[in-house]
Image (cartoon, grey):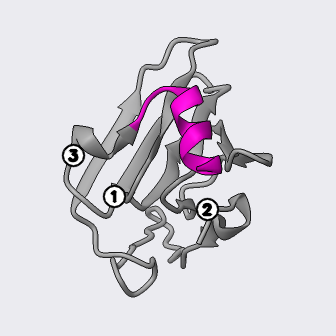
Amino acid sequence: MRASVYNCNVIEFKKIHNRAGNITSINGALEIPFDIQRVYYLYDVPGGEIRGGHAHYGLKQLIIAASGSFDVVIDDGHIKKTITLNRPNFGLYITPGIWRDLVNFSSGAVLLVLASNKYDEKDYIRDYQDFLEYTYG
């Protein structure tokens, strides 16, 4: 099955209100369609910088704006779609075979990623032309 931006979706997670602060929990394989094998985050991204710029052969990810805001541009080789993330109880689920660019970071933004696999350089498609060949191949 060919990857599609329409298989990527925003998931809202339950926010538990408390006068001392809110809490949101995410349970892998229950609230998201994979077990969490790796967690990483981006922060202190200078204004105007673009992060991402790659796709994965097999990795599934959930991207969350833990703080601040940013845009995620997803691309399946045919259609591009921009999703703004700006609330910590929402996450963007990205399926394998989708190119992503992370842009328009607000000051102080923290981008949190929950990933289905540990880091594996062989899973990355880092050249856009290679991605298009993979998509159309």
As drawn, the residue found furthest toward the front would be 137
| Residue bearing mark 3 | 119
Examine the rendered structure and indicate whether residue 34 appears above or below residue 79.
below
Q: Residue at x 58, y 28 (%)?
A: 129
Is 129 situated left or right of 82 in this image?
left
The answer to whether marks 3 and 1 mark residues whose Cβ atoms lie closer than 8 Å is no
Q: Residues within 10 Å of mark 3 (few under 14, many from 20)?
A: few
Task: Find residue 115 and name its label.
Answer: 1
- Residue 48: where, in percent of width, then height? 64, 12
Is 35 situated left or right of 87 in this image?
left
Q: Which residues are magenta?
A: 125-137
Of residues 103 and 65, the one nearer the viewer is 103
Examine the rendered structure and indicate whether residue 45 appears above or below residue 86.
above
Q: State which mark lies toward you, 3 or 2.
A: 2
Residue type at mark 1: give it. Answer: Ala
Q: Is residue 64 magenta?
A: no
- Quadrant of the image for the N terminus? bottom right
Q: Residue at x 49, y 72 (%)?
A: 18
Of residues 71 and 119, the one nearer the viewer is 119
| Residue bearing mark 2 | 3
Residue type at mark 2: give it. Answer: Ala
Q: Residues within 10 Å of mark 1 (few under 14, many from 20)?
A: many
Q: State which mark lies toward you, 3 or 1.
A: 3
Marks 1 and 2 sit apart, C-alpha to C-alpha, by 17 Å
Marks 3 and 1 sit apart, C-alpha to C-alpha, by 9 Å
Q: Residue at x 39, y 73 (%)?
A: 25
